[in-house]
Image (cartoon, rainbow, N blue to C red):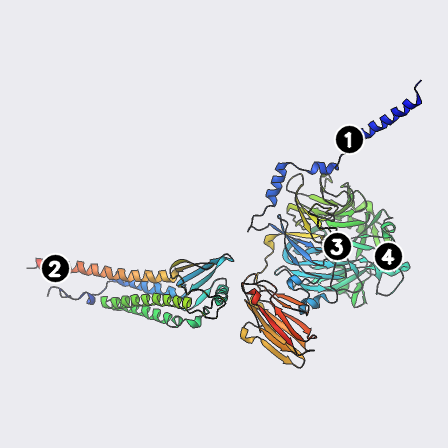
Amino acid sequence: MTTERPRGARFLDQPIDARARLVVLVAAVLLAATYVLPLWNLTMFAPQYQDGLRLDIYSYTLVGGNDGQDIKEINVLNHYIGMRDLVNAEFTEFQWMPFVIGALGLLLLRAVVHATVVSLVDATMLFLYFGAFSLWSFGYKLYRYGHDLSPTAAMQVQPFMPPMFGYQQIANFEVYSYPRAASFAMAASLVLLLAALGWTWWRTRRTASHDEAAVRVAP
Amino acid sequence: MIRPRRLVWARVLTVAALAAAASQCTPSQPASRRAAGGAQSDLAIAAQKTYVAPGDLDEYYMFSSGGHSGQIYVYGLPSMRHLSTIPVFAPYPATGYGFDDDSKKMLGELTWGDAHHPALSETKGDYDGRWLFINEMNGRLARIDLRDFKTKQILGPVPNLHGNHASSFVTPNSEYAMMASRFSRPVPQRPVGVDKYATEYKGIIAGVKIDPTSGDMSLAWQILMPPFDYDLGDAGKLASDGWMFFTSYNTERATGKLEVTASQRDRDYIAAVDWRAAEKAIAAGQGDVIDGVRVLDPKKVPGLVYLMPCGKSPHGVDVAPDGNWIVGSGKLQGVTTVFNFEKIQTAIRNKDFTGEEDGIPVLKYESIKDAEVPVGLGPLHTQFGTDGWAYTSLFVDSAIAKWKLGTWEVVDKAPMSYSIGHLAAAEGDTVSPDGNYLVGLNKLSHGRHLSVGPSQPESSQLVDITEEKMKLLYDAFTEPEPHYAQIIKADKVKPIEVYPQAENKHPMAIWDIKDAGVTRNGKNVLVKMVAVRSTLTPTDFEVNAGDQVTVAITNIEQTTDELHGFGLLDYNINIVIDPGETKTVTFTAKKSGVFAYYCTNFCSALHQEMQGYMVVK
């Protein structure tokens, strides 16, 4: 026997080293940001609203700017076009999202302790899936809000898709929609996971070639 | 020998030549008008100094009394833009004041008032931006909260005191606002002929205690005074803190044609009141209760009041920023008199008196006076700037005189258009005047504006006092009738823009449309209503003829400027509810039929749809 790890062992079964574990730990900690910081922000300006109406979306709640007043104002305005009220009860996401993010965090911690590539890949894949689902869900919500308009509303407008990312003019409003700190933290977390995987891949390859060299020089 | 006929012709020609010459000499305008035109560059500077660009804010608030309109006008300086009207002593449909239950109760039976002298609350002699007090001739005093610019309390009409003119002058830490009678009458009130005026009629000075936290006013004490006409006042500060000064005229105790009978003496009085002594006397249980008020008689409380002779029929008495000089302006003479507080105290200690009036010692004029400043004709009122500058309005001269405390030198005069009454300088009656601006509150405008018929507006002129020479910057025209005004740095006032929902403790407030509706208790009907863009809920309700109906409306908006009105046609009801506010209006449903109610204060794109019906069966 030349080495503990047989040559040609699957990458998934490889261990991850201390450096990668630390990076995964940081990625797990970054997820905590979603409990305190907003994920997304919608800001609307109009001639009558020079200071803008602001809506912050957290993983568990909606928060209006101006001490919550802006969300009431948005609802007052939206009722004229028959849009449903933006209220937490309408968002089932707020009930499961913090739980899922917590579960993701635990999976990451498991990867730190387990220290195998397979645990890290599992967590990363779930992370990617969760991220993609959340974005789709957000987009779908916006779509429904813009399309499920009351037929008896005072003002009949063409159903519309509010902006998910970027700027859009809707009637007298300039609407800006951009990710906020918690989304950046999640993105950073994902980047760190991928980095840990990449690092482990690169390190394993290097060790493997060392081993091959060792085998070649062996008598 | 010259023939007589030729002599006649010579005479005629001479007279004609002289007349022609004379007509060439008489100018078409007075000298002041010809001089006041101003160079183009001056006008450009004035325009720049008063121009507040769209969206920009003014530097100062000016709270100007509305005189017999009963209201207060709020201006921005230096633009002189009229920003709002605060209704105080008269109903004002624009804000629904005097129509809802609370303000209607506050106004009582009176639907007019003559509001003269606003006074901002002070801390250590400086404006603190909390409250504004204003007097009214029907024996009343009002407090406006500057947190929301609303009248919160009207005290009075108080007993005994008639014609509350020498008011509301606040003490340096807002311990008291003052009231004093312009008209004397028998105290207690009873029918006594004017022939007994000199002995049976009395003047009254009253101290109104201000609660330091709530601002709530309560009548603390009154002082029985000789039957003079008490005109204006000012509180002592710093060196003279604890004293209050009131001018008086008609010390002749005359009746009838006062313009003559009350102008006979060369000197009238400034009454110096030791208000701390009054406080102590009341605490010691002194004074007699007259018509429910504890009234102190200076005869029985020595040291309470002293009289300072001041020529002639003085109007303003103004305490200089350091509190040591007291400036009395006798409107029927050409000088303003400056008294020295230290000398007053010395004269009191030395009993340097020249007589007494109803037991009140009269101080010796020569012992307490520092200067007679030759400001000009008809001095009325003095305000202060930085570096010891004083500004005195001259009614007869129609000008403002600028002079220096200490050197008593008059350095400049600025003509006013026309007949200036009071003047107000930026924080000009505090311990630290700002300088910068001064506003002449003129009585006559004589058509310096587009003609609006015989009922002409008053004129308020903005003057730049930053330089050695005063410069007229701007003419503003106001509704009748600013007397005194207060000018405060804008950043000292911090108004809210909506009433926060959490602060609304009104027992009939509702915040959910589901809670709106009608409840009946015998003949009393309560309609709880929600006003929010763009519905008044309920949109209809029924009552029976003869019911006593209370409509309690909560404006559940928390957005700035989203006011809603409730106008009920044919019932003389119009109230306006600010965001977050609850107001009630109570009436008897006398007329039967159908009556529309609607939002009177334009609110939204569907404002016109914001309406409903009251059906009276």
Taking B308 as reference, is B489 left or right?
left
Q: Tell me the element at label 1.
A: helix
**Which structural element holds mark 4?**
loop
Among numbered discs 3 and 1, the one appearing first in the sequence: 1
Q: Quadrant of the C terminus of chain B?
A: bottom right
Please say if the residues under marks 3 and 2 sit with CB atoms less than 8 Å apart.
no
Between disc 4 and disc 1, the foreground one is 1
Report the residue marked by disc 2.
A212
Q: Chain of mark 4?
A: B
**Is mark 2 in CB contact (under 8 Å) with mark 4?**
no
Residue for badge 3: B244
* Place of residue B126 in the rendered image (x, y in percent of width and height, measured from the top left): 65, 53
Choose between A183 and A145: the one closer to the eye: A145
Under mark 4, the amino acid is Asp
Discs 4 and 1 lie in a common subunit = yes
Q: Position of residue A180 (x, y in %)?
A: 39, 60
**Residue at mark 2 to residue at mark 1: CA–CA distance:** 124 Å
Instruction: Write down the residue under mark 1.
Output: B24
Tell which of B594 and B58 is nearer to you. B594
User: Are labels 2 and 4 on one chain?
Assistant: no
Q: Chain of mark 1?
A: B
Percent coordinates x, y for residue A214 in the rendering: 11, 59
For label 4, the residue is: B358
Residue A108, image x, y percentages: 30, 67
